[in-house]
Image (tube, rainbow, N blue to C red):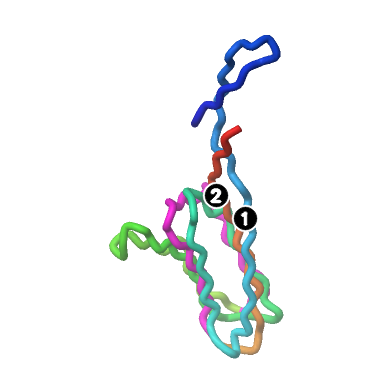
Amino acid sequence: MSKYKWYNNLGIKKEKDVRDQKIKITETATQALGAGALAYSYTFLRDGYLDGVEIHFSGACSQTVSVTRDSVDGANYDTVLKSEALSVVTDFTYFPSRKRYFRKGDIIKIGITSGGSTTAYLTALLEEEHTWVK
């Protein structure tokens, strides 16, 4: 939390707390899985959160989906958040029971193995913390 200062119309100095604001980010990606795997990544420019992942398939899909944190601290701290072998589905969603915190420089990776004749339409729902000085 930071503070900003201003003077009111009587010339009296005031202070007010300014909390970090979260900006919603929606990232999308499309991949024909018959042509290759989907390999999506997003590098957090500031501290932030993963709110959820939604994937729609153009037809029945039986591939494997993985959601991974690639830690700024190195490979020893990378974490698979979700991995699921799908069986003839047209939608996949992953909404953590709580928001997943990512530090500045962490990377979220979302992958879908290749195969079949379906197209994957990915939507990643993210947040980043921003602070404005007034």
Q: Is residue 37 above or below residue 21?
A: below
- The spot of residue 127 in percent (x, y) is 57, 50
Dot 1, how many residues are within 10 Å of its Cα: few (below 14), some (14-19), or many (20+)?
Answer: some
- Tell me which corner region of the image, top left, top right, bottom left or bottom right, holds residue 21: top right
Question: Is 105 inside the magenta-drawn segment?
Answer: yes
Task: Tell me if residue 76 comes above or below residue 61 in the rendering.
Answer: above
Q: CA distance from mark 2 to mark 1?
A: 8 Å
Give yes or no for contact between labels 2 and 1 (Cβ–Cβ under 8 Å): yes
Give the percent coordinates (x, y) of residue 114.
54, 85
Residue 78, numbered label: none
Q: Nearer the viewer, residue 17 or 111?
A: 17
Tell me what residue is drawn at x 62 percent, y 72 percent.
29
The amino acid type, in three-letter code, at marker 1 is Ile
Counting from the top left corner in percent of width and height, residue 36 is at: 55, 87
In this figure, which residue is indicated by the disc labeled 1?
25
- Tell me what residue is drawn at x 58 percent, y 55 percent: 126
Residue nearest the viewer, comparing 71 with 9 = 9
Q: Earlier in the sequence, mark 2 or mark 1?
A: 1
Q: Amino acid at mark 2?
A: Glu
Determine whether the residue tagged by mark 2 lies in a helix, strand or loop: strand
Indicate the quadrant where residue 22 lies: top right
Q: Residue furthest left?
A: 76
| Residue 98, position as x, y percentages in the image | 52, 47
Residues 88 and 15: in front is 15
The local secondary structure at tag 1 comes to strand
Q: Residue at x 61, y 32 (%)?
A: 134
Q: Write down the region rendered in magenta.
A: 88-114
To which residue does mark 2 refer?
A: 128
